């Protein structure tokens, strides 16, 4: 027997910023809080600018007009796919999805 399940997208319903964190309440009741340093424009904004946000796409993202910043809910839930985190070095990927560091090419070792 096959069961059909409806995929629902998690959306933002409320947003707040402290001096060092962005907190977003989601439709499923979770509150995601991330450091402002992940979003330099938001970190550099005044408290008034941070409080002047609007939901976009029915809640798939948040927009701050005064600082021209858009942040998606997906980037908050899976930052490793969207955000260059401080202290993390990006590893170049090959077209097949693997790291270039071990691309299969072998160098001759001279002794």
Image (spheres, rainbow, N blue to C red):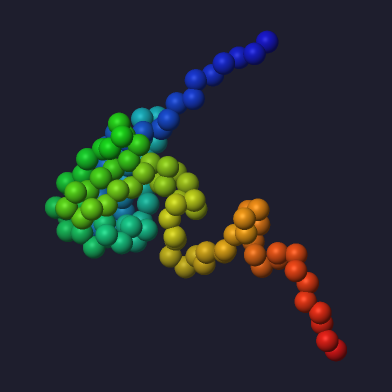
Up/down of 7 relative to 3, above or below: below
**Residue at x-position 65% and y-position 53%:** 96
Q: Is residue 40 visible?
A: yes
Drawn side of residue 78 relative to residue 55, left or right: right
In the orientation shown, which residue stands out farthest toward the bottom? Answer: 111
Up/down of 104 relative to 35, above or below: below
In the orientation shown, which residue stands out farthest toward the right? Answer: 111
Percent position of residue 84, x then y: 44, 60
Quadrant where the C terminus lies? bottom right
Percent position of residue 13, x then y: 29, 33
Residue 101: quarter of image: bottom right
The front one of 76 and 109 is 109
In the orientation shown, which residue stands out farthest toward the top? Answer: 1
Q: Is residue 16 visible?
A: no
The front one of 19 and 81 is 81
The front one of 36 and 83 is 83
Up/down of 22 relative to 27, above or below: below
Drawn side of residue 14 relative to residue 28, left or right: left
Percent position of residue 20, x then y: 29, 58
Quadrant where the N terminus lies? top right
Up/down of 86 relative to 42, above or below: below
In the orientation shown, which residue stands out farthest toward the left? Answer: 48
**Residue at x-position 43% and y-position 65%:** 86
Percent position of residue 56, x then y: 28, 37
Drawn side of residue 29 relative to residue 43, left or right: right
Drawn side of residue 39 relative to residue 86, left or right: left
**Residue at x-position 44% and y-position 61%:** 85
**Residue at x-position 31% and y-position 61%:** 40
């Amino acid at each position: 027997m096959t069961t059909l399940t409806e995929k629902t997208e998690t959306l933002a319903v409320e947003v707040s910023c402290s001096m060092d964190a962005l907190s977003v309440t989601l439709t499923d009741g979770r509150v995601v809080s991330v450091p402002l340093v992940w979003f330099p424009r938001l970190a550099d904004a005044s408290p008034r600018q941070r409080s002047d946000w609007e939901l976009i796409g029915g809640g798939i993202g948040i927009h701050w007009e005064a600082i021209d910043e858009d942040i998606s809910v997906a980037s908050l839930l899976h930052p490793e796919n969207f955000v260059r985190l401080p202290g993390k070095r990006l590893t170049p990927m090959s077209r097949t999805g693997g790291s270039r560091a071990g691309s299969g090419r072998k160098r001759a070792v001279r002794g």
